[in-house]
Image (cartoon, rainbow, N blue to C red):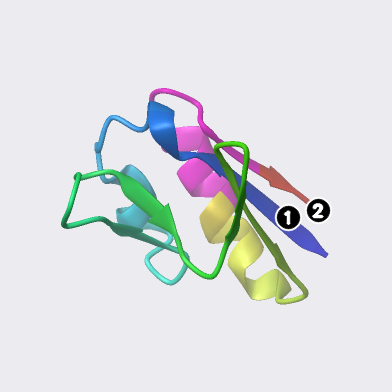
């Protein structure tokens, strides 16, 4: 299982995650911050649990590119 977590409040809106993993991330038109699609929010952490391992590489690249290091990916 792939587990992706986003700390949305700390997002600076750089858009790297959307460029590298567009199927999992998009930018909010309201506040310009990243949104982890189909995630569940709990205490400011947005988490997506997926059995689709095809998203793993793109999400790992997005996590590495994030300048504020608010994306984590666990396999």
The answer to whether the residue labelled 1 contacts the one labelled 2, judged by CB atoms less than 8 Å apart, is yes
- Residue 65: image location, x then y, percent: 42, 35
Q: Residue at 30%, 56% (x, y): give it.
A: 19
- Residue 60: image location, x then y, percent: 59, 48
Left or right of residue 39: residue 19 = left
Residue 60 vs 56, above or below: the answer is above
Q: In the rendering, which numbered label is found on residue 75?
A: 2
Q: Where is the N terminus found, in terms of image quarters?
A: bottom right
Q: Does 8 lie within the magenta span?
A: no
Q: Residue at 64%, 52% (x, y): give it.
A: 4
Dot 2 crowding, Cα within 10 Å, few <14, some 14–19, many 20+:
few
Q: Circle 1 sits in a helix, a strand or a loop, which is it? A: strand
Q: Residue at 64%, 73% (x, y): give it.
A: 54
- Residue 24: image location, x then y, percent: 47, 65
Q: Which residues are the magenta region? A: 60-72
Q: Does 66 lie within the magenta span?
A: yes
Residue highlighted by disc 1: 3
Q: Is residue 66 visible?
A: no
Left or right of residue 20: residue 60 = right
Q: Circle 2 sits in a helix, a strand or a loop, which is it? A: loop
Q: Residue furthest top?
A: 68
Depth check: give the residue in front, 14 or 29.
29
Depth check: give the residue in front, 70 or 22.
70
């Amino acid at each position: 299982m792939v587990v992706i977590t986003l700390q949305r409040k700390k997002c600076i809106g750089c858009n790297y995650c959307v460029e590298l993993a567009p199927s999992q991330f998009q930018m909010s038109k309201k506040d310009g911050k990243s949104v982890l699609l189909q995630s569940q929010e709990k205490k400011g952490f947005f988490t997506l649990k997926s059995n689709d391992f095809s998203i793993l590489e793109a999400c790992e690249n997005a996590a590495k590119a994030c300048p504020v290091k608010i994306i984590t990916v666990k396999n």
